Image (cartoon, grey):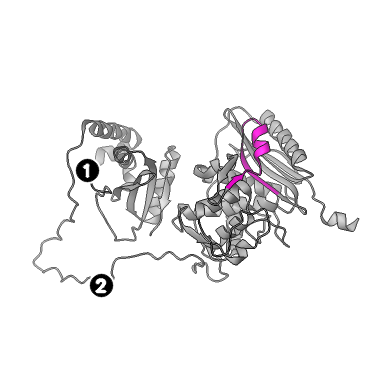
Amino acid sequence: MTALSAVAAPYAAMVVDSRSGKVLHSRNADTRLHPASLTKMMTLYIAFEAVQNGELTMDTKVRISKVAAAEPPSKLGLKAGQRIALRYLVRAAAVKSANDAATAIGEAVSGSEAAFARRMNRTARALGMTRTTFKNAHGLTENGHMSTARDMTTMGRHLLYDYPQYYNLFSRQSTHAGVKQVANTNRRFLSNYRGADGIKTGYTRAAGFNLVASAERGSERIIATVFGGRSTASRNAKVAELLDLGFRRAPSRVALRKPTRPAYAGNAGTSGGSASEPVGKTIRVATAVKKSLRPNIRPTTASAPAPTVLAANEVMDAEIKNALKEAKANTASIYPTAAKTAEPAAPTIIEEQEPQVVTRLSTSGGRHWGINVGRYGSRYAAEKVLLKTALAEMSTLDGSLRKVVKSKRGFDANFMGLTRETADLACRRLQARQVNCFMIGPS
């Protein structure tokens, strides 16, 4: 009897209207229970945050440690010493719920799984997950590694709204994870429940069968969480029942109130020392030299020479001129004051044979950050978007350089030469107008 009770999985549930955050149903929602692989939602959230803020990229090659390779199943089957792109680790953790991939993500972001767990706990507090404590990146049972149905529902809602560009990962029936094709642990529910598009399953003997699920029908979106299911089938049936309850109780129309994304702090405070002492992955930033090797300007010089601008073709075709006029008109309606007081300079475009379009380069004032506003099939399309965006967001993008970066996958439209604060502000303002945007960190 004692042995059975030791592995018993108490039941808990939570249902919310994702648009407003209003609770539509709860049972034992604040009871601390084993989250199992629901933990990986936080692991992935921090990975997305790290990429967004330039700590690493989805193409960063991660070296697999002996610790990560030794994690028990479910796993991708990574080998110690192997190098694999972060994007494949993210896919494996999100879709297959691979424990080796989750540990490797934590080590890549914070240097060690212990340091990463401290970052997980700090992030959980910032998200309002007041009864959650993480001890690892994968969710395998460990003393003190606990959460609640309420906290995991909060986690799922933040994943949906804070990083919508990655949310499609959770609805993939299968995906290629670099070394092999992997199937989604949630594929049965995704296939059988109308409107379901995520989010994450979890199972251990101590936890039972857990699931945070989200479904959208028309303008309504519901998130339901279950802890302690007795089987995959019974858990899925219960979650379907809860989602149905949510759709019945939720109003057809409600004001969208997205959760507030926490302030970015990176790995600060994860070493146990001062919050200003970062640990784990270090980004080396190339700054301007402290002492200029140029001779001093003569006292008789009236003013400093104007900065040199790269030679460019000043002639734009008719379609770009039309796009410029359209963007100016849009800017006048969005920022009437700015339109009256400031006339933006004509855009500068590098001739077609150049690999990048650069208007101006600045390395002063800590301007080592940038933002990306999309990848396009042609240089022309990227240039056109940059022109429109520059005019529509003059107040935050003033002084930045417009850069088109060519790769095998297309043409990235970037604004460079920003401070981190300005890049973050610009992205938030653009995202508020439904413009895709993410930050580019120093390289």
Q: Which residues are magenta?
A: 181-202
Disc 1 residue type?
Ala
**Residue 266: in sight, yes or no?**
no
Residue 34 sits in which quadrant?
bottom right
Front-most of residues 166 and 162: 166
Is 192 magenta? The answer is yes
Q: Residue at x 29, y 66 (%)?
A: 288
The residue lying toward the viewer, choosing from 393 and 86, is 86
Report helix, strand or loop for mark 2. loop
Disc 1 crowd, CA 10 A, few/some/many (<14, 14-19, 20+): few
Q: What amino acid is at disc 2?
A: Lys
Q: Position of residue 365 (x, y in %)?
A: 31, 61
> In the image, what residue occupies the spot 35% across and 35% down?
334
Q: Is residue 108 left or right of residue 398?
A: right
Q: How many marks?
A: 2
**161 and 39: which is toward the camera:** 39
Q: Where does the image place residue 144, in percent across and percent down from the top left?
A: 72, 61
Q: Say above or below: 361 vs 257.
A: below
Q: Earlier in the sequence, mark 2 or mark 1?
A: 2
Asked whether the residues under the numbered discs 2 and 1 touch, taking CB atoms below 8 Å apart as contact, a structural biologist would say no
Judged left or right of residue 83, residue 209 is right
Q: Residues within 10 Å of mark 2 (few under 14, many from 20)?
A: few
Res. 58 visible in picture: yes
Magenta highlight on residue 153: no
- State whether residue 279 is above or below residue 133: below
Q: Classify the position of the C terminus by image quarter.
A: bottom left
Residue placed under numbered mark 1 in the picture: 345
Query: Residue 369, position in %: x, y?
Result: 37, 55
Q: Residue 40, how many percent across, how many down?
A: 62, 52
Query: Can you identify the residue that label 2 sits on?
Result: 291
Residue 355 numbered mark, or none: none
> Helix, strand, or loop for circle 1?
loop
